[in-house]
Each structure stands twice: as structure tokens, then as C-alpha cells.
Amino acid sequence: MASGDPEDDMTDRIERACADPDLRTVFQPMIELDTKDCIAYEALTRFSDDDDSLTTRDWFAAAESLGIGAKLELAEVAAALRHLEDIPATAALAINVSPKVAVTDEFFELVAPYASRLILELTEHEPVDDYDALVDGLQDLRDLGARIAIDDVGAGFASMRHILRLAPEIVKLDLSLTADVTHSAGSRVLTSVLVDFAERTGVLITAEGIETLAELEVLRELGIDHGQGFLLGPPRALEAHLN
């Protein structure tokens, strides 16, 4: 029974979600723009609850504030991994993880058996205090074949610092760049600079948030090879993508 204390109630809801073996996961494809091939599916958690006003971001922010953020992240990853055997061998599974959780023993033990098929998308819920520790902590998973992706590139200085320190295999352009690229010369120039950087360093670059044919056309003209967004495939059950 609910205690009436909002913090206790939210803690209880998060704990129930962590214990749910069927924690709902939807997937959004990452598409090679020329061939239309899917190179990866990004796993995204959706919470079913009586209170539909809370977004996924709200759930994770609440969990972090209550000191159980890592527990919820690990539950999210475990739920996504249960779908891996159904993903075609030609595609990877992309999972979101915070730098803090990415270097824990619990995370390593959970994902190590599947590392060669994983893309680890580092989120920015909080600043990275020790990049050396993060680089070292991720190296064992990279040695097993996991690839590192940096989200929201172009949105701020933090993501650029991530790139320089972590040398990721994949950078994902922030959706704000995608949204502005058809009408903002500045966004087109910045995108071109990032594409040039990626080509020179051998990094795969993906544009997020592609929603219109006009955006897709401009991005391809600028040299973007891979993309995600509702135009290419909305987040939905894995079976819906495969069928």
C-alpha cells in the first residue's frame, strides 16, 4: 500500500520496474542511408504505470535523485539484452548507459558475454570527473568487441570533450542540428565540420531525429551516411521492425 509520501511512492514504483522481467523495451533502427540496411537497433525503455505523465527521462532522473539510478539502468540493460537473440546477426544492439554505470563490475558482468554485438551509447546525465578511469573502465569491453558511441554531438562542449578523450567508434549528431539543417546555414556548416572530422578519424557518424525528406536530402548532401528518426523508423516493438 502506498505510504502517501511522494518520494516513498516513487521509490516503490521504480523498485517494481526494476524487478519486472518484462520491462518494456522498444527499438529504433539505425539505417545506412544509401542501402537502407539496418546496422543497429537502439533499445529504449518505456514504463507502464498508472501515472502516464512521467516520461522515461523523468523516471531515470527520479531514480538518480533517490540513489537507485544505477539499479534502474542495469534493469534496463538486462531487459534489452533479452531481445538480442532475435536481432539479425548483421545488426548490433545499441544500449544507453551512463559513464558512472559503464565502469561498474555489475555492468561488465552483464554485458561482457554479448560485447561483440553491442554499441554502448554513453549518456550525459552528469559530468565525467575522471576521464582516465572511464577510458580504462571501457577498454575491457572494447577488447571484447564492443563499440562506443557518443550522443548529442554538436549540442555542447561536453560531447566534444567526450569525443577527444574517448575516441569513440560512433558519434551521433544531436537532433537539434538535424532539425535546423534545412534552414540554418550555421547548422549546415557545423554538420560539415563534424562530417570532415569523422572522415579524417575513421569514425562512423549518425544523424539523429530525421523526420522529413528535406532533412534527409540535405544530410546526405553533407555526407551523412547513417541516420535515425521517425522517417526511417519510429521506436516500436522489435517484432514490428522485423516483420
Image (spheres, rainbow, N blue to C red):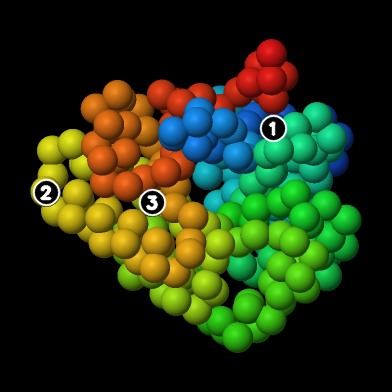
Q: Position of residue 196 (x, y in %)?
A: 31, 62
Residue positioned 71% across, 38% down in the render: 90
Dot 2, crowdedness within 10 Å: few (<14), some or many (≥20)? Answer: few
State the residue position of label 2.
185
Q: Residue at x 45, y 42 (%)?
A: 226
Q: Earlier in the sequence, mark 3 or mark 1?
A: 1
Q: Quadrant of the N terminus?
A: top right
Q: Splitting the image into 4 quarters, where does residue 5 fall?
A: top right
- State if disc 3 and disc 2 touch (CB < 8 Å): no
- Vertical comparison of 27 with 201: above or below: above
Disc 1 residue type (three-letter): Thr
Look at the numbered disc 3 and give the secondary structure of its residue: strand
- Read off the residue under disc 3: 173
Q: Give the x, y percent position of residue 84.
A: 79, 38
Using the image as rendered, state which of residue 160 and residue 75 is in the foreground: 160
- Count residues near mark 3 (Cα–Cα under 10 Å), then give few for <14, some for 14-19, many for 20+: many
Circle 1 is placed at which residue position?
25
Distance from disc 3 to disc 1, alpha carbons, whole Å, reads 23 Å
Circles 3 and 1: CB atoms closer than 8 Å? no
Question: Does dot 2 land on a helix, a strand or a loop?
Answer: helix
Q: Three-letter amino acid code at disc 2?
A: Ala
Is 98 left, or right, of 17 in this rendering?
Answer: left
**Residue at 35% of width from left, 27% of height from top?**
211
